[in-house]
Image (cartoon, helix red, strand yellow):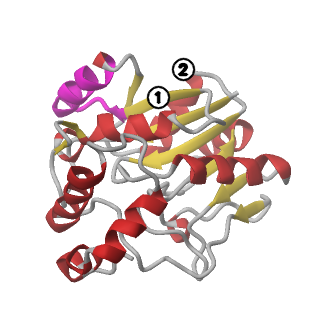
Amino acid sequence: MILAVLQARMGSERLPGRPSMPLARAPLVVRQIERMARARRVDRIVVSTTTDPADDALEAVVRREAIAVHRGPPQDELARLAGALEAHPADHVVRIGDDSPLVDPDLIDATIDLHLSEQADHTTNRSPGAAFPAGQGVEVITADGLRRLAADSAALRLRAGDARETPPPVRWSSLALLAQPDQGEVRWAVEGPADYAFVAAVYDVLYPANRAFTSADVRRLLEQRPDLASFGGVRRL
């Protein structure tokens, strides 16, 4: 059983209200759930958010999509992630942040496949020097490993798309799905207003014609649109 946890909250410091911002006439979090749901290896999706009253509206939006919601301490992402596992038992947990409405379902599956085939404790696709783009970050961890982290109160920060901030303990086996060439400087993550405008533009072009548009479709669009390829002065391709 593989549980995908989308960690989301309305109180982003750089972009407050991010999950509710519209993409193709639906909240960003809904569009991201759509993409995560296309991953074949994922058995269930849960949105993990905080007990802060500001996240009541987020919970309502997610439940309208028939997706489960788990809420936990506002200042402890690890506790919320472990709590989602406790409420929805699984063998492995896929963790994805709410800044990734362009997340690639095939990349989710590939990261899971590597994790399972090598029987790793922890697997990421954002290894420095061979990383997939920011906004494509996927982490997979065994349920036993996550419980061990929570029990040990480890100072592990699980943040979307940055493996350097999520180092597993040395006693673990950790793997990385490598991108060749390195795409670590490419940003598809919605971290600030310019990132949101970029992703909204991509959705406006691609979503009406193909709701299941792929990363390859995004790259083709950027090759044809130099204005988007460097939107906001950031590398997008």
Residue located beneath label 2 in the image: 87
Quarter occupied by the C terminus = bottom left
Q: Picture coordinates of residue 110 (x, y %)?
A: 67, 53
Q: Give the farthest residue toward the right.
A: 118
Q: Picture coordinates of residue 44 (x, y %)?
A: 56, 26
Answer with the quarter of the image where residue 41 lies.
top right
Q: Classify residue 57 as left or right of residue 117.
A: left
Image mark for residue 100: none
Q: Mark 2 packing: few (<14 Cα in 10 Å), some, or many (20+)?
A: few
Quarter occupied by the N terminus = top right
Q: Is the C-beta separation of discs 1 and 2 under 8 Å?
A: yes
Q: Which of 139 and 198 is in front in this view?
A: 198
Q: Picture coordinates of residue 209 (x, y %)?
A: 31, 44
User: Which residues, given as a range, are shown in magenta?
Assistant: 49-63
Q: Nearer the viewer, residue 211 or 43?
A: 211
Residue 150 lies in the magenta-colored region: no
Q: Residue at x 71, y 44 (%)?
A: 145
Q: Residue at x 72, y 31 (%)?
A: 91
Residue 60 lies in the magenta-colored region: yes
Q: Main secondary structure of the magenta part?
A: helix
Q: Residue at x 16, y 33 (%)?
A: 54
Residue located beneath label 1 in the image: 46
Q: Classify residue 229 as left or right of residue 94.
A: left
> In this rendering, does residue 121 appear at all?
no
Instruction: Identify which amino acid the numbered label 1 is placed on.
Output: Val
Q: Residue at x 20, y 46 (%)?
A: 11
Badge 2 element: helix
Please name which of the two marks, 1 or 2, marks the residue nearer to the observer.
1
> In this rendering, does residue 103 appear at all?
yes
